[in-house]
Amino acid sequence: MINLLRGRPGIAVDELASSLGRSERTIYRWLNELSEDIGAEVYFTAGGYYLAEETASGMLRLTPEELLALRIGLKSLPFAEGSPLRDPAESAWLKIRDASPSKDLQTARELSDSYAVHVTAPKGFTKPGIPKVIENAISHRHRLKITYRSQKSNQVKDYTVDPYALVFRRHSWYLLAHCQEHNRVVQFKLVRFREATDTGVEFELPADFSIEDYFALSWEAWAGGEPTDVRVRFSPKVAVMVAETRRHPTQKVHPQIDGGIIFEATVAGIEEIAIWIMGFGKEAEVLAPVELRDCVRDHALTMAEIYSERDEEPYASVEISSILRDTARQ
């Protein structure tokens, strides 16, 4: 109805009823409710209805560029399927869309052809209903009984937790909760939940709990590890690429004479940053700490063993296949 009022100023009530497939009585009720729902001012003159562009609530009109930015933002990874905020985000967009002039929406659609946002991240599958149970427990400060698959052991276990907050880190949603079995705040990945039951038992959120403090030294998504000073030498081949981005609030970059750099940071634990460093292969060398250097070296040696053990198999298979093909031709 809003689009009709905007697109056909002065439209009569019988035309509205016919276009929308509703009775005139329903149309009159909807016209009266418009101002209550979105603060839209509708007025009647010369036998037709008009929608004032300025709303009764004084809501600001968004530009096409702002509409496009909002739509892209509300369709991004934190609001993707399985996200606790997916439904509220979609609802918010529908309200914004319906309260915006159709010509601005059309311009925004045309502008969208000049932008593309693609995140190469795996999509997890959260069991339906679990995010709602968790959200409700956080809102009412209720303890949860959960069944969860551990990443390290790959075992499914039961835990009793006090849910503190839902957070989005890197590519995934996590629950921060005090776990009775671990006697500390633990980070649970949402896609690994098997069950979540609200016990109705209330708990008190600690006054000193802070999401920012919990993730203060996190490399990307993992937190809770011991603060560790890390030093890595990057070769000239990748130095500029590493230095051009601020990856951590504590990082320091020291240029070297050969064009390489020494990268320093203080991070929570070594597991996550080790994965990042290994992605650079021979272009990166861990200088400190010893534990991180040993971790990367052990992975490299194991990989070398795996590939050297199988080196002869593929070549042998190719050689045998070639002989068989040549024999068949003859």
Image (cartoon, helix red, strand yellow):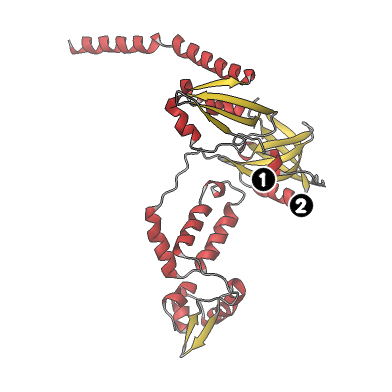
Residue 222 position by quadrant: top right
Helix or strand or loop: what does disc 2 sit on?
A: helix
Vertical arrangement, residue 107 with respect to residue 141, above or below? below
Residue position marked by numbered label 2 in the rendering: 140
Q: Residue furthest left?
A: 330
Label for residue 166? Answer: 1
> Which residue: 63% across, 40% down?
190
Residue 130 appears in the picture as rendered = no
> Which residue: 73% across, 40% down?
177
Place of residue 18 in the rendered image (x, y in percent of width and height, measured from the top left): 44, 78
- The foreground one among 110 and 216 is 216
Q: Residues within 10 Å of mark 2 (few under 14, many from 20)?
A: some
- The foreground one among 61 and 16 is 61
Vertical arrangement, residue 47 with respect to residue 210, above or below? below
Query: Relative to 325, is 175 on the left or the right?
Result: right
Residue 89 position by quadrant: bottom right
The amino acid at mark 1 is Leu
Q: Residues within 10 Å of mark 1 (few under 14, many from 20)?
A: many
> Which residue: 62% across, 49% down?
84
Residue 90 appears in the picture as rendered = yes
> Which residue: 76% across, 52% down?
140
Query: Relative to 9, is 74 on the left or the right?
Result: right
Distance between the alpha carbons at the discs numbered 2 and 1? 14 Å
Residue 112 position by quadrant: bottom left
Vertical arrangement, residue 183 with respect to residue 319, above or below? below
